[in-house]
C-alpha cells in the first residue's frame, strides 16, 4: 500500500489519474488496500496541482463504480461457486454469506446506497447483492448516486483543511456513523409508510 501511495505522489497529470483509477478499481474487488486512504491522498495532491479536483472526482467516480460493478457482476454471474477459490473466500467468508444476503434483503434495493458508506464489508455486501439478482440498473443508480455524494465531499473536505488527510479520515469515520444512523431512520420511516399503505382501510 505504501509503495503505491508513494508512486501516486510522484506522478503528475494523466498517469496520476490512471493510477488512481486502477487503485480504486482493485480496492473495489477486494485488494488489501484502504480505499478511503487512496482517495484522501489523491485529494491532497490537488493542493499541489498534481491533479485537479473536478477531473479527480470524475475519474474516481468511474474507478469506484468499475470496482463495485465488477464484484457485483461476479456475484450475479457466478455466485457461490467463486467462493471455492481461496482469494474469494477471504473477501466473502462462506460462513458469513447468508448473513450478508439477509442484510441486503432486509434493506431492499435502496440499501445499495448505504453499502457504499460501509468500509470493510462493502465488497462482500456488493457480492451478496449480485447473488440476489438485483437488477444492474438499480445497482448502478444507487451506487453511482452514493459515490456522487461521497467524492465531492471528500475531495473538497481535504482542500478545506489543507490536506491533513488524517483528520479527514477521522471525520469520515464519525460522519459515516451519523450518516448511517440518519439513513437507518429514513429506511425505517419508509418501511412503516409502506406497511401502513398496505393495510386495508
Image (tube, helix red, strand yellow):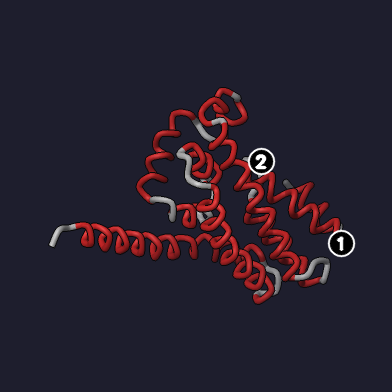
Q: Image point 76% across, 69% down: which residue?
A: 46
Residue 90 in the image: above or below residue 190: above
Label 2 Cα neighbours within 10 Å, binned few <14 / some 14-19 / many ≥20: some
Picture coordinates of residue 154, whole percent (x, y): 62, 67
4, 53: nearer the viewer: 53
| Quadrant position of residue 36 | bottom right
Marks 1 and 2 sit apart, C-alpha to C-alpha, by 24 Å
Q: Furthest-top residue in view?
A: 84
Q: Secondary structure at mark 2?
A: loop
| Quadrant of the frame with the C terminus | bottom left
40, 115: nearer the viewer: 115
Q: Image point 69% across, 51% down: which residue?
A: 24
Does the CB distance between marks 1 and 2 fall below 8 Å? no
Q: Image point 50% across, 53% down: which residue?
A: 138
**Residue 12, disc:** 1
Picture coordinates of residue 38, whole percent (x, y): 69, 55
Amino acid at each position: 500500500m505504501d509503495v503505491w501511495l508513494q508512486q501516486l505522489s510522484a506522478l503528475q497529470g494523466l498517469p496520476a489519474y490512471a493510477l488512481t483509477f486502477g487503485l480504486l478499481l482493485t480496492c473495489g474487488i477486494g485488494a488489501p488496500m484502504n480505499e478511503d486512504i487512496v482517495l484522501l491522498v489523491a485529494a491532497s495532491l490537488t493542493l499541489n496541482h498534481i491533479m485537479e479536483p473536478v477531473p479527480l472526482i470524475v475519474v474516481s467516480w468511474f474507478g469506484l463504480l468499475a470496482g463495485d460493478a465488477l464484484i457485483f457482476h461476479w456475484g450475479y454471474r457466478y455466485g457461490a461457486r467463486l467462493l471455492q477459490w481461496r482469494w474469494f473466500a477471504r473477501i466473502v467468508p462462506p460462513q458469513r454469506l447468508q448473513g450478508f444476503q439477509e442484510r441486503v434483503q432486509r434493506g431492499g434495493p435502496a440499501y445499495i446506497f448505504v453499502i457504499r458508506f460501509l468500509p470493510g464489508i462493502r465488497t462482500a455486501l456488493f457480492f451478496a447483492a449480485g447473488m440476489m439478482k438485483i437488477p444492474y440498473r438499480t445497482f448502478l443508480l444507487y451506487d453511482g448516486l452514493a459515490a456522487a455524494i461521497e467524492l465531492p465531499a471528500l475531495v473538497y473536505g481535504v482542500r478545506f483543511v489543507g490536506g491533513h488527510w488524517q483528520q479527514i479520515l477521522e471525520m469520515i469515520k464519525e460522519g459515516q456513523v451519523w450518516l448511517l444512523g440518519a439513513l437507518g431512520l429514513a429506511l425505517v420511516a419508509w418501511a412503516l409508510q409502506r406497511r401502513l399503505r398496505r393495510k386495508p382501510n
